[in-house]
Structures are given as C-alpha cells and as structure tokens.
Image (spheres, grey):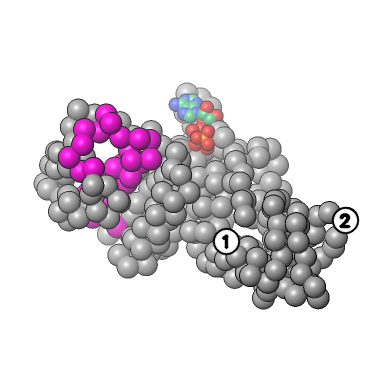
Amino acid sequence: MLIEANHLALELDGISILKDVSLHMQKGEIYGLLGPNGAGKSTTIALLLGLYRADKGSLTHFSGQDAEFVSIRQRIGVMPEFAGFYEWMSAREYLIWYAGFYGGSQSPPDSLLKRVGLSQTANKPIVQFSRGMKQRLALARALVHGPELLILDEPTNGLDPRGRREIHDLLIDLANEDKVGILLCTHLLDDVERLCTRIGIIDNGKTVLEDDLEHLLRDAGKPRYRIHMTNIPEGHLLPPLVRLLEWDGSWWSFEIDLPHGRDIGKVWEDLLVHGWSFDEIQVESNSLEARYLELTGSDKPDQQEKAA
Ligand SMILES: Nc1ncnc2c1ncn2[C@@H]1O[C@H](COP(=O)(O)OP(=O)(O)OP(=O)(O)O)[C@@H](O)[C@H]1O
C-alpha cells in the first residue's frame, strides 16, 4: 500500500480540524479526494506530507518501508494549487535548478518538458507562460525525482479543454505505465469520473465515504441527461448505451449506461451519427454528484459544462 491512514484526528489552535479521516491507496491507483471547501482536504494532505503529526489514528506510507518523513518525502511528488516559480528562469533552467534538491533529475529535463507538452517553450522565461503552461511546468516539477506517489491539488485548473485532456492522458499514463499512485484533490467531478479508480469524500473533518468509483457508480444508478433536440430521426433509432426515458415537448431525457473509463463525448458523437441532432445538453442527474451532495449535504461542487 502507498498510504494507509486510519482514523486520523488533528487539532490546530485548539480547534478540531480533522476528526476521523481514513485513506487507503494502492500503487498505480488514481484516487480522488473530494469534499466541500473547508472540509479538511488540504490538512489531510499536510498530514500525509508530514507537515503536521496526527493527534490520533495511524498513518503508514509505502507499506511501512520508510519510517522517516525525510525519506518518505523523497518518494512523493507534490503539485500545489498555486505553484510559485522563479519566473525569470526558462522552464528548462528551472527544472535543472529544482532537480538539484534531489541530487539531479530522474529523467532528463527535456524529456519531462516533452512529456508535459512544453518542449516548444522550454527556453522561454516562465514569466511569459500562461496559467495552463505553468500548471504543466508544476506537474513536470512534481515528477522531477521520479516519485512513486503524486499528490495533485486541482491540477487541471486554468487549462482549456485540450490542455485538460492532455493532462488527463498523462496522468492515466503515469498510473498505468509507471505505476505511480496519484492522489487527486479536486472539485471537478468530471475529472474524477474520467480519471479515478477510487474516491474518498471528506466532510467536516470526517471521511464519509471511501470506495471504488466503479462500485459507487454501480450502486448509485446510471447518469441521466436532458437533451434539447433540433432533429429527431425517423424510428427514433438510438445508439448503444443510450435509453430514452421521456419527452416533455422539447426536451428528451436519456439514461446512459456508460461503462467506467468510457468517454461521454463518444456517446454524443454516436447520437449525431444516428441522426439525433441537438443544441444543448443538461445533466439531469449525475450519480457521482448526487452521491456527493447527499453525503456532504452542504456545498455544491463546481460543474463542468457539458457541451455537445
Ligand atoms: N492552522 C490552522 N488553524 C486553525 N484552523 C485551520 C488551520 N488550518 C486550516 N484550518 C481550518 O481547517 C478547516 C479545513 O481546512 P482545509 O484547508 O484543510 O480545507 P479544504 O478541504 O482543503 O478546503 P478547500 O477546498 O477550500 O481548499 C478550515 O475550516 C480551515 O479554516
């Protein structure tokens, strides 16, 4: 196991911040850590990184092979939500400099920059980078020492859809090919559905759910969408996975039996191929979101626009 955390509790300044947090992560797993603002996600991450020590509970990294946080930290890569850089440096210079903290880069900086899609801008000063480019550089920095565990805070923030997809593909590749465990802290449930195999939800300092995503989605039911049609084919021929539920005069409701890992975008393409043209899609119920809201009962996470 990469992380085995049981019933962690922590008080800060006399306030009980974490009351009962548990988290279990395997090698090569992408784990989504979810929860409303102020639930305790960042504090949990700080505990995992050894920045705080829990008052109660047990925490083991890497199956207990390393007891010292100094050596544990050598095996973890972190991408914080807001990464600071020396912006006068070029991306290549920065990575070479940063790798010095770990006695040099595990993989050549140029191949890291290529991996995150920055090879064309490797020699540009970081000050000229867009937010998305800085996100990519922050990811390269987190990978510089070849970590076994990556902790990412909102890694796709500020990225356009293509950039977001590229980071998704890279994370999937890191988990599947390099067997890196990825702890993804995000409010974007679309990212979670696309990437994660396992999720943990924290609310008010307590873990209220920890489960395999596939299991959770199977239990929670299939996602339902409302689609505004501009053309409906004769015979109402539907592509596989899509089941028509009802029509209210202008909107059609569909249930989509989307297997885990299958891209919803392909379903919309299939609908178009079958002659169903539409100008708007609304999520009627997304089972992960519904479960999240039910369990946290307070905050509503950011929604991703579902565009056709
Ligand atoms: N050093 C501290 N002293 C007192 N309270 C703190 C301290 N650090 C965090 N808190 C409080 O602990 C709670 C949990 O904070 P935390 O940053 O872990 O939440 P979060 O789930 O990461 O939130 P967000 O999604 O907004 O980033 C918040 O109410 C915060 O104000």
| Of the pair 273 and 171, the residue shown nearer to us | 273
Residue 256, horizontal then vertical, whole percent:
69, 66
Is 235 situated left or right of 275 in this image?
right
Residue 235, horizontal then vertical, whole percent:
81, 75
Q: Would you say residue 181 is visible in this rendering?
A: no
Magenta-span inclusion, residue 232: no
Magenta-span inclusion, residue 129: yes
Circle 2 Cα neighbour tier, 10 Å, few/some/many (<14 / 14–19 / ≥20): few
Q: Which mark is residue 265?
A: 1
Is 252 situated left or right of 29 in this image?
right
Q: Is mark 2 within 8 Å of ligand 1?
A: no
Residue at 14% over, 38% down = 93
Q: Which residue is mark 2?
A: 248
For the magenta stretch, what is the residue range? Answer: 121-148
Specify the quadrant that holds the C terminus. Answer: bottom right
Residue at 69% over, 46% down = 293
Specify the quadrant that holds the N terminus. Answer: bottom left
Report the Cα–Cα distance between label 2 and label 1.
24 Å
Residue at 50% over, 63% down = 197
